[in-house]
Amino acid sequence: MENIENQLSQLRLFGFKTSWNALLETKRSNELSLNEGLEILLQAELQDRDNRRFERLRKSAKFRYQASLEELKYDVSRGLDKGLISTLATGGYINNGESVLITGATGCG
């Protein structure tokens, strides 16, 4: 098992390795078929690569302020539609090739 972990590290399959260790710890690896186990491991690797890419892009963007949707205040005075914000957060407009224009008072961010 240690040889497998070393090889995964050498190949830089960090998501694969993390998922492999989780499968071993929970003893789920014995319950899964080869196809099911491989699918879980590959999905974990893809997710890990997407997460690392996002973090790299976020850091290189050097945003002035760090904010998240969870921190958004939906006060009535702000006129924010929580449903619309949730829809925008899914990113469906990107796949549809639609543009989004967000406007507000000068200096509000």
Image (cartoon, grey):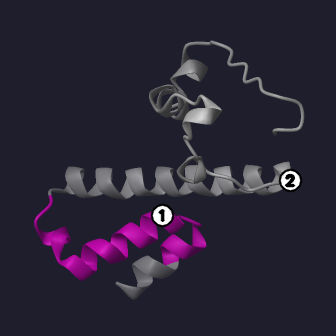
- Whether residues under marks 2 and 1 lie with C-beta atoms below 8 angstroms apart, the answer is no
From the top left corner, tell me how far across and down residue 61 is, in percent: 83, 48
Provide the residue span drawn in magenta. 7-32
Q: Is residue 84 above or below residue 8?
A: above
Residue assigned mark 2? 64
Quadrant assignment for the C terminus: top right
Q: Residue at x 47, y 56 (%)?
A: 45
User: In front: 10, or 107?
Assistant: 107
Q: Amino acid at mark 2?
A: Arg
| Residue 32 picture location, percent across and down | 15, 60
Q: Nearer the viewer, residue 76 or 20?
A: 76
Residue 84 picture location, percent across and down:
50, 25
The secondary structure that most of the magenta stretch takes on is helix
Residue picked out by circle 1: 15
Mark before the other along the chain sequence, 2 or 1: 1
Q: Is residue 95 above or below residue 68?
A: above
Note whether 88 is above or below 14 in the view shown. above
Residue 75, given in percent of the width and then of the height, sits at: 56, 41
- The residue drawn where x is 25% and y is 58% is 37
- Which of the 4 image quarters holds residue 22? bottom left
